[in-house]
Image (cartoon, grey):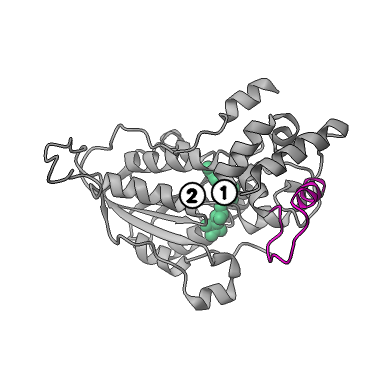
Amino acid sequence: MGHVPVLLEEVLEALQPQDGETYVDGTFGGGGYALRVLAAADCQLYGIDRDLDAITRAEALAEQRPRLTPLLGRFGDLDDLLATAGVTVVHGVMLDIGVSSFQIDEGDRGFSFMRDGPLDMRMGQTGPSAADVVNHMSAGDLMTIFRQLGEERQAKRIANAIVARRKSEPFKTTLDLAQCIEDAVGGRRGKKTHPATLTFQAIRMYVNDELGELARGLAAAERVLAPGGRLVVVTFHSLEDRLVKQFLRERSGATGGGSRYMPEVAKGPEPSFELKRRKATEPSEAEIKDNPRARSSRLRVAVRTDAPAWTQTVETGKSVLPLKQLEAAL
Ligand SMILES: C[S@@+](CC[C@H](N)C(=O)[O-])C[C@H]1O[C@@H](n2cnc3c(N)ncnc32)[C@H](O)[C@@H]1O
């Protein structure tokens, strides 16, 4: 089965596609958002994805749709990717963070603890895999990843179990790792979710540097959006939503102002975004019923002002071992 786009109508409503404008979909996936945007206005759309399978799908769709240009790469580099295509300014950026159903459903990609496959979990086809993470990182580094990116309360127990088990045999498959985690935490104990859920999420987020990508992608969007351009971000996870919320609060000046005791608190640069709504948009009950995967999705929207992009980098607030360091140690 393909990927069912979430909050699709709300995304369209936020982007407001217009004839003659140029948009970027930083997470092309199955093209659910992109195709609707292309149908809604006589616009140009650049579809970025780091997954070659998604770009192969995009290229097939582009054969019949000359206004669609697929670009293989990471949305953290979206301004550089657009520059290679000769584009420096756009009127809208969409990001739909996370994995697609295509990726989860394909056992060979190693994302799911429900399907056996090689322990991979990379969306792009480069860099350390999930197997590299669990077979090479120290128990302390693993624990930090499980705690910070998975908010897993049994992080220490799981990390120690992984390190003990790999001494006799390295991990190769998803089910092998899932079983080790289940054994470590004492089975399911009546819980609805699988005991490996948060650990798998943490490893996936680490292997793909998902929070780092989001931080870089938001800053890159800020640099390429024209005044009046729309930034539309859908997340599935509270860590990601928090990052988007903080970025937009800061860049829209909602956090500045100091207090009456400290009236001279340094004001940031001119706001580069205007918030359309302070609160995130959530899916309707009807959407959740049709597509339970939509349950945790959150949409945030902001409009670019004419102030220059800020030069401050966007921080993820997490302190896991840098992926480059793991790569160098392998
Ligand atoms: C949730 S799906 C997007 C689905 C899409 N909105 C649709 O309607 O079909 C996320 C997609 O983003 C891609 N992706 C995730 N992180 C990325 C990144 N940093 N750079 C580029 N693509 C990324 C994944 O490979 C996946 O195909």
Q: Observer-nearest residue: 302 or 175?
A: 175
Q: Nearer the viewer, residue 297 or 19?
A: 297
Which of the labelled discs sits on residue 151, or is there none? 1
Q: Is residue 240 magenta?
A: no
Element at label 2? helix
Name the residue tied to disc 2: 239
- Decide: few, some or many residues near mark 1? Use Cα within 10 Å; few <14, some 14-19, many ≥20: some
Q: Which is more toward the observer, 285 or 199?
A: 199
Ranked by sequence position, the earlier of labels 2 and 1 is: 1
Residue at 34 percent across and 41 percent down: it is 224
Q: Residue at x 39, y 39 (%)?
A: 220
Q: Position of residue 163 (x, y in %)?
A: 76, 34
- What residue is rendered at 76% in x and 57% in y? 114
Q: Is residue 94 left or right of residue 261?
A: right
Q: Secondary structure at mark 1?
A: loop
Whole-percent x and y of residue 27?
Answer: 52, 50
Q: Quadrant of residue 301?
A: bottom left
